[in-house]
Each structure stands twice: as C-alpha cells, then as structure tokens.
Amino acid sequence: MTDAADLAPIREAVRALCADFPGEYWRRLDRERAYPTEFVAALTKAGFLAALIPEQYGGSGLTMTAAAAIMEEIQASGCNGAPCHAQMYIMGTLLRHGSAAQKERYLPGIARGDLRLQAFGVTEPTSGTDTLSLRTTAVRDGDHYVVNGQKIWTSRAEHSDLMLLLARTTPREQAKSRTAGLSVFLVDMQQARDNGLTIRPIRTMMNHATTEVFFENMRVPAENLIGNEGEGFRYILSGMNAERILIAAECIGDAKWFIDKAASYARDRVVFGRPIGQNQGVQFPIARAYIGMRAAELMVREAASLDEAGKDCGAEANMAKHLAAEASWAAADMCVQTHGGFGFAEEFDIERKFRETRLYTVAPISTNLILSYIAEHVLGLPRSY
Ligand SMILES: Cc1cc2nc3c(=O)[nH]c(=O)nc-3n(C[C@H](O)[C@H](O)[C@H](O)COP(=O)(O)OP(=O)(O)OC[C@H]3O[C@@H](n4cnc5c(N)ncnc54)[C@H](O)[C@@H]3O)c2cc1C
C-alpha cells in the first residue's frame, strides 16, 4: 500500500480521532507534565498502534508507509505521538528475533494494548551515543540473569509493562568481536519494580515522560532473552530503521502543522493596512519551509518503500530522519517568526510544538552521528570514531 489514494481513509480516520484531542487538552497536560492516557487509549482502541504487527498475532498488518502516515497525521493534527510511538516499533525486535513461543506469548497482548512495550533501555549516562561502551551487565545465574547498572532517557518507563533492555553479557575484553557480547531482554516491569528496578522521572523542556532507571540485582528469567546471547547489538540495530522512518514521518507532520498555521495567520493578520503574508519577507520563509518539508517527505517515502520491500534502507532511513528533523525545526522557527509576539503565547500551541519538535535533531540519533554514518557507509570516508 503505497499510493496516496489507498492511504486517504487511514489519514482521515486518524484526523477524526485527533479532533477529539484539541489544543486545550495538550496544553493542560503540558502544564502538569501529565501523560495523555485518554489519547493513547483511543489510538490503541482504534488499532493504530498495532499497525505493524502481523494479523496472525492480532495486529493490523499494515505497511511501513501506512504506519508512517498514521504518525504524520497525529502530528499534523497538533497532537503528539511521542508518548506512544514506540509501541508501534519496539516490538519489531521481538517479531524479527524472538522465538515462536515469545511471539505467541507477547505479541497478541501488545497488539491489543494490554501489554505496553514502549520502554527502550539503550542509552546510558556514561556511554551516550557510544552504545558499545554501555556498562549495564546481565550475568547468568541458573535460570535467570542478574542485571545491574543504569539507563538514562528511558522514555515512557512509567507507562510500560515491558522494557526492551540492552545489557552486556560478556565483558568487552572477552567478546569475540567489537560488536559482540551485548544481549537483549524483555523485562517485565511490573514484576521488576519491587525487585531491583527503580524509575526516576526526568523533567524536560517538553512533556515527554522520560526517566532514568536503575537496576540493582534485578532478576530476569533466562527465557526472556531474545535471540542468541551476545548478538543483541545487531538485533537493536535492525530495529532502528523503523524508528527513524516513523519519527521522520512525525517531523513531516509537525512541519505541515507549522506551515499551515503560519500560512493561515499570514493571510489573515493585517498590519500597515495589508495582510502580513503580502510581504515577501513573510511569504518567502513560509515557502522555503514548505519546499524543505516536501523534499524531506520524498526521502521518508523512499525509506519506507525500501523497508517494506525488505531492502536495505539504512542510508535512506538516516537521511529521512535528518532531513525531516531539520525541516520541522526550520518550520517551527519560521512559524514563531511569522506570528510575532503571538508565537510565544501558550494558547496558540506554537511554543509547545516548537519545544516538542526540537528533540528530533538530537534523539533518537543526533545529527552528527547521521552525518558520520553517511560519510563512512555511503561515501567511503574513514571512520572517525
Ligand atoms: C527526551 C529524550 C528521550 C529519549 N528517549 C530515549 C529512549 O527511550 N531510550 C533510549 O535508549 N534513549 C533515549 N534517548 C537518548 C537519545 O537517543 C540520546 O540522547 C541521543 O542519542 C544522544 O546521545 P547523548 O545524549 O548521550 O549525547 P552524547 O553521545 O553525549 O553526544 C553529545 C553531542 O556530541 C555529539 N557527538 C558525540 N560523539 C560524536 C562524534 N564521534 N562525532 C561528532 N559528534 C559527536 C553528538 O552528536 C551530540 O550532539 C532520549 C533522549 C531524550 C533527550
């Protein structure tokens, strides 16, 4: 399903759902730094968050293009998909690398939304982007692994039943290659919370439900290891294209929201006896933001098509994320400028969306790391780190 006509009903359905969650709803949550429980429940009930789960496990079995359209429409409607977007893609690691028994056990519940698998424990305070240097360890003890260490920026941990955790199972110096020795686990967070798992919220510039988590002798059943011990880094990498494509689609949605808002204001706002949008100094930045958004949108579609055709899309997913994050941030900045003082007023929602979209040139991967991926893997330049 790749053409616009096929996706129109999905886009309309997402828009209709989002209409029940207007600006006031998001402003209140933003002020209280509260989780959008009702919004996430509505998306779950409509089946949108199960878009990428195959029908045999109770999901909608849609394509990456369709999933991207869902995320884009959420953002273009002025809502925020960040509190739940990971429910769509974290399960990909389980789907691709989990055993038949694990998939039967977890995927139907994830598809229904009874099991929220939307916490992703990769980043650590000391290692940052250098994932291979992470320090959290999982040591085998009988039919369990014992986990010790810390993660940071583990978003939605307080609103998840399961966490996908990356931990070191073989000390770095004993691992058979640079990328070996890390393993992936499904952690039952409800059970772990009184048994070695501590979650501390981190307050950020936008309402993001992010946290830091601490593991102190947390026991994880060995049957919750995904795939083979020591191969976890490869499994995590294989899920990153989906994450990048879907977040790029969210950025396209944000850019569309900012551009629509700015164009509409520039048509209506009259200063010096004429609409401000009649001045080229006001129209050109809006046109420039539109061009940037459309170009980025093409790359997002290209990456999604390659992904759903089962082709390698590492470069395209990275470029899509980069272009889309730059486009949404440029559109956000333009939208504030077009609104003058009103761009700063809470009731216009622009300052909230401005803060929300700022994240995406940093997370889930920062601009420099994308540039170095393209330099090394596409252009054959020497590895810089
Ligand atoms: C709100 C929020 C939510 C997040 N959610 C999650 C989550 O759910 N799960 C999770 O695991 N992580 C999450 N993250 C972490 C996110 O993926 C990282 O913040 C991001 O990848 C950057 O890593 P870092 O913060 O450690 O920066 P660092 O690695 O410390 O880098 C800092 C800066 O230096 C640059 N830099 C570093 N090394 C190089 C180099 N070799 N060459 C050039 N530049 C370099 C980086 O590009 C960056 O600009 C989240 C982060 C935030 C802020």
Image (tube, rainbow, N blue to C red):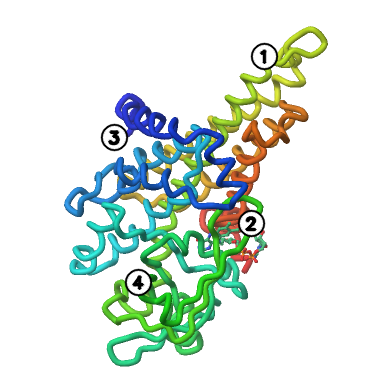
Q: CA distance from mark 3 to mark 4?
A: 35 Å
Identify the mark nearer the N-term, 3 or 4. Answer: 3
Inspect the image, locate mark 2, and give the three-letter code of the amino acid beneath it: Thr
Residue 132 visible, this orientation = no
**Residue sticking out furthest to the bottom:** 142
Q: Place residue 351 in its image quadrant.
A: top right
**Label number found at residue 1:** 3
Instruction: Check contact, mark 3 vs mark 4: CB within 8 A.
Output: no
Amino acid, disc 3 = Met
First in residue order: circle 2 vs circle 3 = 3
In front: label 2 or label 3: 2
The local secondary structure at tag 1 comes to helix
- Name above or below for residue 277 compared with residue 182: above
Look at the image and tell me whether residue 361 can be seen: yes
Q: Does ligand 1 reach within 8 Å of label 4's beta carbon?
A: no
Q: Which residue is mark 2?
A: 204
SS at badge 4? strand
* Disc 1 target residue: 268
Residue where numbered disc 4 is placed:
188
Q: Is mark 2 within 8 Å of ligand 1?
A: yes
Regarding ligand 1, which quadrant of the image does it lie in?
bottom right
